[in-house]
Amino acid sequence: MALGAQLIVLGTGIVKSLLLPHVMSVESFAYWQQYVLYSGFVGIFALGFNDGVYLLYGGSSYDELPFKRLRAAFRFYCGMLLLFAGAIALYALSQDAERGFGFFFVALDTFVLCVSGLMTYVLQITDQFKWYALCTVIDKFVFLAAAAFMSLLGFTDHRLFVVADFFSKVLAFSVFIWRCSRLAFGPVSSVREGWQEFSRDIKIGINLMFANFAGMLVANLGRFIVEWFGGLDGYAYYSFGTSVTNLVLTLVTAVSSVLYPALKRLPDDAYRSYYERIDRVVFLLACVGLAVYFPAYLGVEAFYAKYTPMLAYLNLLFVAAVYQSKMSVLVNTFYNALRKERRLLIVNLQSVVGFCVIAFVSYSLTRDIWWIAASTAIVGAGRCLMSEFELRRELGIEGMLGAIAPFVLTIVFFLSTQLCDFAISAVVYAIAVVIAAGACTVVTERKKVRGAR
């Protein structure tokens, strides 16, 4: 059900990614993407509370949750979020009209999205994927319907789309509250117990929150740099490229929402075999993800002529998206299951520092957005490879083909799309996929034979 919901999210995402840049001007699309970028980071204001609940109660049933303590902690949580939302609203007043409008709705999103995020985790860890699926797709459908209706009427002002986006989130928020009403309403424990639960959840989850935040920075710091220094047009081009590649992320990361609760119900000695199985599936998804580049390239050329400058670095954005997907599905899931949030945090912080060094130096010297995309791809690949090597050692997995094969494939993909004509690069990539898949199959069969012996 969760995967089906994410397929629907993917479909609506495709339509939204194709519709909005088509109906909006480049400038208006840039302002819309600014709102999307900053609202995507409001989860940091949860300070790890959601992640603490996720880690502490993963594998529990809904009726087993300590509702009185959680309700009391929830009061503290809502109060904290309102304070952060108020601070962002004050910041919005200090900005110009266009940016201030976007930041005002980012302030509103802070409360709505953080509370919805808590409910999302509760539905995941308690195995209520039917409701998780419904709540995941409802706001996407509502926003898409509103966006399509406004487009038909000829409305192209980004502010109308921001308002529609917020109200679609409020609708999903209402469904979350209704379904998880026992978490929000009812008798509460003492203030002291509520504060203990609140502080404990934050203490447990803050490492994972900062790790996820650092991971998001690795994927999105390039957008911040382009927004700050590259001008509205450059930011619109880069954002359109990332919105195209994020379609790959949406599909692949759907798996991660199911994996963690499932892994927490398994004995620790089963992690090794499941890691290898999931790794093989992720490899196949990575092959498909990179292949999407070719129809995406043709589609931009044919229908989005005003955004063709971003084709110069679209291949790099696809490489970055594939490694971000693998990090989310495979690495993050097993780090969380093994309770190595601190190690994940260190890896992601190292990646942020590495990105800042590479990107700021290269971009300051060249003023070419290509280097921002290159920095994102390089650091994303390096972060994923380092984490995979460590996890394989931790789980006692011999051989590194599962990590090396995708890396070699992405190198072939990048070199062929960067240096060869479009048709030749497509053929070269197809041949590389066949060879890599064959090599992985041979290694897998040999392992099965050794295991049988």
Image: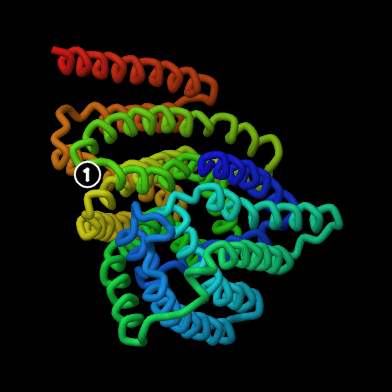
Residue 31: x %, y % from top left: 62, 65
In the depicted view, which residue is nearer to us: 352 or 236? 352
- The answer to whether residue 373 is above or below residue 282 is below
Query: Crowding at label 1, few (<14), some or many (≥20) Cα neighbours within 10 Å?
Result: few
Residue 368: x %, y % from top left: 45, 52
In the depicted view, which residue is nearer to us: 285 or 356? 285
In the depicted view, which residue is nearer to us: 30 or 424? 30
Let me know if residue 364 appears in the view. Answer: no
- The answer to whether residue 448 is above or below residue 164 is above
Secondary structure found at label 1: helix
Residue shown at the point (50%, 77%) measured from the top left:
186
- The answer to whether residue 163 is above or below residue 257 is below
Give the residue type at disc 1: Met
Residue shown at the point (59%, 56%) measured from the top left:
236
Q: Which residue is mark 1?
A: 386
Q: Report whether 394 appears left or right of 332.
A: left
In the depicted view, which residue is nearer to us: 8 or 431? 8
Quadrant containing the N terminus in the rendered view: top right
Image quarter for residue 103? bottom right
Residue shown at the point (52%, 62%) measured from the top left:
37
Residue 414: x %, y % from top left: 40, 33
Quadrant containing the C terminus in the rendered view: top left
Residue 25: x %, y % from top left: 72, 57
Let me know if residue 315 appears in the view. Answer: yes
